[in-house]
Image (tube, coloured by chain):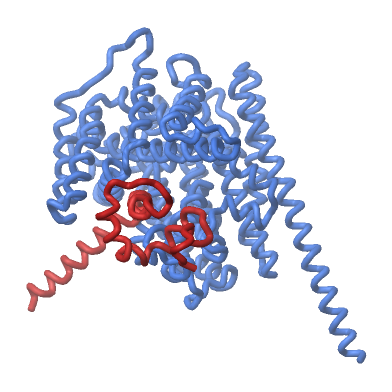
Amino acid sequence: MKITAIRNWLSRANKLANEYYNAPYRAAVARAKREQDDLFMLYVYAEMMGIPNPASYYTLELQPLLLEQFHEWHLRMGMEHSPFDEFRCC
Amino acid sequence: MNAILLMLLGLGGMFLGYVFYSKYVAEKIYKLDPDFRTPAHEFEDGIDFVPTNKYVLWGHHFTSVAGAAPIIGPAIAVIWGWVPAFLWVIFGTIFFAGVHDAGAIWASSRNRARSIGALTGDVVGKRSQSLFMIVIFLVLLMVNAVFATAISGLLINFPSSVVPVWGAIFVALIIGQIIFRKWMGLGTISILGVLALYAMIFVGPAVPLALPETVMGLSDNASWILILFFYAAIASLLPVWMLLQPRDYINGLQLFIGLFLIYGAVLISGPELVAPAFNTNTPEGTPSLVPLLFVTIACGAISGFHGLVASGTTSKQLDKETDARFVGYFGAIGEGSLSLATIIAVTAGFATLADWQAVYHSFGQGGVSAFVSGGAQILQQGLSLDVEISETLLTVMAVLFAGTTMDTGIRLQRYIFQEWGGIYNIKWMEKAAPATLLAVGSCLILAFGAGGADGTGGLAIWPLFGTTNQLLAGLTLLVITTMLVRLKRPMYVTLLPLLFLLVMTIYALLIQLKGFYDDANWFLFSLDLLVLIAAIWIALESASALTRIRRENAADQAGENATENKANRS
C-alpha cells in the first residue's frame, strides 16, 4: 500500500517535472515541427501544382493520409481555398 | 537589527499582501471569473495555447521574469541604507508589481491573449504602439549591455567561478541530448544535472581561471564581454531544445535551491545588519534618494519586463482566469523575495560597518559582487560552507541568470530586427544570422560606447535601464487603467502606481540628464534624452487617452439618461 502511494507520488512529480521542462518551449518546438510538416505537405502535393516530383509514385499513397491536415495547411500557406481545380477543399 | 526579523517582516508583509490585497484586486477590480473561457481553451492548438497547471505556470512565469536584475538593483540601492531599499521592495511588490503582473495577464486573457504591445495599439492608440516598440527595443538593448558587463565583472572578481559557469553550459548541452533522445527519465536527469553542476562548483576554487590583463590590446573586461556576446549570439541561433531549454531547467532548479540555502542560512546564523538603516554619510557623488531609488530598483519592486512575459506567453497558457492571481501576483512575490534575500546579503553579510563602507565607496558600487561576497559570508556562518565555495556557488547562480536573460534578450532583439526587415522590405535583415549580428552589434556599441574601451560603461547605464523598464511598466499600467475606465470600475489601484512611476521616472531622467551633461558623456546624454522624450510622450498619451475615454463614458451616460428621460416622459 505504502509503496504504491510512493510510486504514485513519484510518477506525479515526474509528470510535473516533465511539464515544467517542456511548457516554455512547447511553442517553439511545435512551430519548428509544423514548418517541417508544411514542407512535407508541399512535397506530397507538388505534382498537383505542376512541380515535377520524382517520388510522386510514393507520395501519392500519402495523400489520403494527409488529407485531414490539408485544410489547415492551405490556410496557413495563405490560400483561402484549395489551390487545385480538381481538388476542392472548402 | 537582526536579519531574521527583517526577513520575517518582509516575507510576512508580502504574504499578507497576497492574502488580502491581491484578493481585493482580483475579486473587486479585475473581477476574475472562474467560468470565463480563457484563450488557452478557446484557441487551444497544442502550440501556443495550452491550458497549463497553475503551479507549473507559476514556476515558468517566475523563472522567466526572475533574472539578475532583482539582484543588481537592490545591491546598488542599499547605499542609501537598508530601510529605503527594503520598504520600496516590499511596498513595490505588494502595491505595484503584483497588481501590474496579474493585471497584465488579465488584460491579455480578456483580449484573445494578445501581447501588451498589440493591446496598446487597440486600447490606447496607434501612436502608443510604435512608442511601445521603441521602449522595448531600448530595454532589451540596455539589459544585454548591462548584464554582459555584470557577468564579466563577476568572472574577473571570482576566477573560481569560470570553470563551473562555462561547464554548466556543457552540462546543459549533454542533458539536452539525453532528454531529446529519451535515454533517461527527467527525474534521474535532474538529479544528475544538479549533482554535476554542484560538483563543478566544488572543483571551481581549485582551478581558478583568469584571462591575461590584456588580450590583443583589450582589457580582460572587454575580452569577456566580447566572448559573452559571441556565445549569446550562437546560443540564440541554436535550436532551443539543444541548449536553452535544458539550461533554463537547471537554472530554475538552481534558483529554488539558492533561495532556500540563503534563507536557511539566515535563519540558522541570524546575522546582524551592519549597514546603517539610513545612510546619512553617503559617498560623494551619490544622487539623492528620491527619485533615484525608484529607478535603481526596478525588478523586485515593479518591472515592465514582467508585462511582456505575462502577456506574451503566460496568458496563452492560463487554465482558469482566477489563476491569474496566483501566477501573476505570487510571481511578483517570488521576485520580491529574491530582492529581499539580496538586501539581507549585502547588508548583513559584512563583518563590520567599515567593511561595508569599503565596498560601497561610491554610487554604482556593490552590485552583484557585493551580493556574492555578502551572501557567501552568510552561507559560511549558517551552513559552515567554505567561503570560496559559497562565493563560487552564488556567482554561478547570478551568472547563469544573467546569461539566460542575455541570450533571450538577443533572440528577442533579433526578432525585432527581422520584423523591421519585413516591414521595410529589407530582405537580408529578415534572415536570422544577419539580424543576430545587428542585435549583438548594437549591444556592443552600447556596452563600449557608454564607458570607453574597457567596457566598464555597462553599469553606468543601470539607472537608465531601470528608468526605461519602469516606463514599460507604465505603459502596461496605462493599458490596464484604460480597460478599467472603459468597464467603469475603480481605476485607482493602477492609476496611482502609474502616476507615481511617471513622476519618478521623468524626475530621475532629468537628474541623470544633468549628470551626463556635467560629465560630458554625450552618448548617454542622447540616450537619456531619447528615453525622456518617450517618457513625456507616454505621460501625454496617458492623459489624452484617459480624458477621451472618460468623455466617451460621460457621453454614453448622458445618452442613456436622455433615452431614459424620454421613456419616462412618453
Of B348 and B444, nearer the camera is B444
Q: Is residue B471 left or right of residue B33?
A: right
Q: Residue at x 40, y 56 (%)?
A: B11
Of B288 and B396, nearer the camera is B396
Residue B52 locus on image (x, y percent): 36, 65
Q: Quadrant of residue B56?
A: bottom left
Residue B556 locus on image (x, y percent): 80, 71
Residue B384 locus on image (x, y percent): 18, 41
Q: Residue at x 28, y 26 (%)?
A: B158
Can residue B91 be seen in the rendering of this structure? Answer: no
Residue B419, compared with residue B234, is above or below; it is below
Q: Residue extending furthest top? A: B217
Q: Residue extending furthest bottom? A: B570
Chain painted blue:
B
Q: Is residue B66 left or right of residue B499?
A: left
Residue B224 locus on image (x, y percent): 34, 22
Of B505 and A50, nearer the camera is A50
Can residue B202 be seen in the rendering of this structure? Answer: yes
Chain painted red:
A
Q: Is residue B303 left or right of residue B211?
A: right
